[in-house]
Image: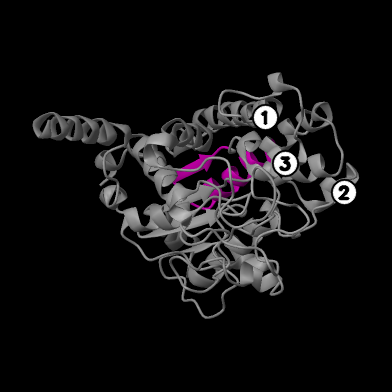
Amino acid sequence: MTTIRALFLVIFSSAFLVLLPPCTTHTLQTCGFDAIYQLGDSVSDTGNLIREDPSSVYARLPYGATFFKNATGRCSNGLIMIDYLARSAGIPFLDAYLNENSTHSSGVDFAVAGATALPVEILARRNITATVTNSSLTMQLDWMFTHFNTTCETDKGCFKKHRTALFMVGEIGANDYNYALFEGKNLEEIRAMVPEVVQAIKDAAERVIDYGGSRLVIPGNFPTGCLPMFLIVFQTNDTTAYDKFHCLKDLNNLSIYHNNHLKKAIEELRKEHPNVIIVYGNNYQAYHWLLSKAKILGFDTRKACCGIGGDYNFSIMKMCGAAGVPVCSNPDKHLSWDGAHLTQEAYKFMATWLIHDIYPKLQCQSST
């Protein structure tokens, strides 16, 4: 019996290891990146929003409690994906651009939680209000080039420096749709926004390339219909509205529609800039991979760790960070941190998958 049990454990352990991509702890070091520049939203913000708005819930515990023991502005209990990418590249965690105490010697994070791809003025023409921040992708690009203009002595020097940098253009665009959804726009109206949103991301990539960026990753959107916040707000008794993971099909199809347009835009960029390496970051597939392996990895895919109420442990009226909202005892066993963002552990697995996927496409071996 003992022998059979031991054999079972060996087989189970082997099967478990097969689920995981190879270790990516130092994979990106072979690329020789000495800096990473990040544009985006709450998936990537390391502290810009809380400097714009110190009253933000992200500026206080329990955000950051697991890793940092204090709130850094990351929308998680600890590390987020850009932290794991930086670690894999062998460089320090990126400081927020608005952090005046940082030297920004190994790159800068320009991402802002709640940011949109389209300028807020353009959204306003569609009667959509960006309620969290005005620091859209355009504003972040202006910050980026202000930074470059103050740290590079010449354009030529800047271009040379950027050849050894990684530029993360997103993830961004999800909030353009999210604000529209929560303000009552229907899916047909929102789908009509997609080409304009994707064009804004493509234009941002063009600006980065024009300033010497030679290796870019442009990540797609997550499957929005899998996040507890959306599952609560847009819940329905129609069982056919849900997929096998109990995600809302229509919202996920919106993410897929955006991502397909983004992939086409990336193909256009590659044709226009054949000497620039431009890689699609497949956040959607990374999250779906994580969902498919969640049970064996021990994740609760349904309930938010930090939250209160209902099947998903989430209430739009009393969200994580509000007084009296509890935190689960083991965040590492939850995919969702606060109903809208993931836990450190979930981000670690997603980053591992993403690094494994993008690494060969970055052509690091041939460029070092």
Q: Check disc 3 and give the amino acid type.
A: Ile
Extreme-front residue of the structure: 1
User: Residue at image x 51%, y 74%?
Assistant: 70
Q: Is residue 160 visible?
A: no
Spatial separation of the CA atoms under disc 3 and disc 1: 10 Å
Q: Check disc 2 and give the amino acid type.
A: Ala
The residue beneath circle 1 is 248
For the residues labelled 2 and 3, say whether their Cβ atoms are less than 8 Å apart: no
Q: Is residue 118 visible?
A: yes
Q: Label 2, secondary structure: give it.
A: helix
Question: Is residue 15 a member of the stretch shown in magenta?
Answer: no
Extreme-top residue of the structure: 240
Disc on the earlier residue, 1 or 2: 2
Between marks 2 and 3 in the image, the one whose residue lies nearer the viewer: 3
Extreme-left residue of the structure: 3
The residue beneath circle 3 is 232
What crowding class fits label 1: few (fewer than 14 Cα within 10 Å), some (14-19), or many (20 or more)?
A: many
Highlighted magenta segment, given as a residue range: 199-220
User: Residue at image x 46%, y 52%?
Assistant: 81
Residue 124, which numbered label? 2
